Image (spheres, grey):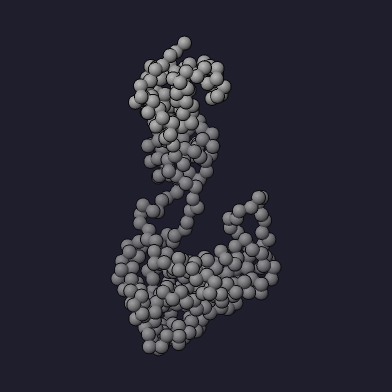
Amino acid sequence: MVKINLSSSEMEDIEEALDSPEVMEKFKVKLLVLRMHVEDVEHGIIARAVGKHPNTMTSSLKEYEQGGLSASLEDRASKPVSAVNPFLDCLRCFFTVAPPSTAKQAAARITALTRLTLSEEQVRRLLKKLGLRYRQSAAIPGKHDPQMQFEFLPKELEPRLREAAQGKRRVYFGDAAHFVLGCFLGMIWSFRRLFIKGASGRQRYNILGAVDRHSKEVVTVRTKDNINALSMGLLMEILAGQHPGIPVTLVMDNARYQRCEQVRTRAAELGLELLYLPPYSPNLNLIERLWKLTKTKCLRNRYYPEFFQFTAAIDAFLDSINSTYQTELDSLLSLNFQLFTNPDLRRREV
């Protein structure tokens, strides 16, 4: 029979460990057995109180007798080391250069590199351990010039935005969106996979718009016909008419109908400044975010059997955007422009 006698300081250490929230419950049971043993409680009563076999209690007492409190608090649970651990740095480098599309593809690459065979569930856990997340890829024009974008922001765009913040200028970001009657699919929380009907035909609702970064004002010209220089002239007339006596800058891309001589001449007549973005730079045009929000709020995962219902949904959203979605616009139209550098542009291997 094991018999342990404890000093007052040892008892204080045990009491402190019992009260500590950092000590796991299984270790506290050991300490409770030890304390009841010191108080001369019968082993049978202790075993019933803590729900342990008497042999387990004896092992706990011997553990303390041989190693003290630190031995009683040591976690001796099995901690197997994964066979893939020596290859983690190699795999991290490999998947940085060639991200896998699926867990099955990643498993094949891991096997080729390490000669280890992992299940797809094991691969998913490993990828998360390496810091990878399953993300949707995004598109960027292949002909964009990162250096030109980098220089355009501080030299051209930011000075005008500072004047706008001071109330000395109005800066609008403009572009056209072409909404095609059809099925806009997206992610959705559901108990089963949902199927959205697709409308027949290819009817388009074309909207030429401009959004003020600071006031969040949205101005649009909507038509079922093509967007052209005449549409641009109408939009510029609206912008110039709303802000007489204040310089107005319209930031746009390089579409032909926006850069043609007719548009430039009309802008000069109206006293409107046209500021053209570097080629292939949708990431610098804030109105692209507005068009994305439009699709999310009134088109995604929705079915419109008739074209007039489709256009009515878009009109209702744009007509109410400044009154209903002001908070979202404040966040959406922040001046955080994403610039792309070479490390961001990975060539994805197939």
Q: Residue placed at 36% from the left, 75% from the top?
A: 165
Q: Measured from the top left, where is residue 57 in percent x and y?
A: 49, 19
Above or below residue 238? Residue 161 is above
Quarter residue 300 falls in: bottom right
Of residues 44 and 106, the one nearer the viewer is: 44
Q: Is residue 247 left or right of residue 239?
A: left
Where in the figure is residue 329, as x and y percent of width and height? Answer: 48, 69
Q: Residue furthest top?
A: 1
Of residue 344 and residue 44, the one placed in the foreground of this image is 44
- The residue positioned farthest toward the right in the image shown: 305
Image position, residue 296 (x, y; %)? 56, 64
- Indicate whether 190 appears above or below 324: above
Q: Quadrant of residue 324?
A: bottom right
Which residue occupies 44% across, 20% down? 38
Task: Indicate whether 336 appears above or below 92.
Answer: below
Q: Residue drawn 48% across and 44% down?
A: 100
Q: Position of residue 163 (x, y in %)?
A: 33, 77
Observer able to see residue 324: yes
Number of callouts in the render? 0
Q: Is residue 252 visible?
A: no
Q: Which residue is located at x 30 percent, y 68 percent?
A: 154
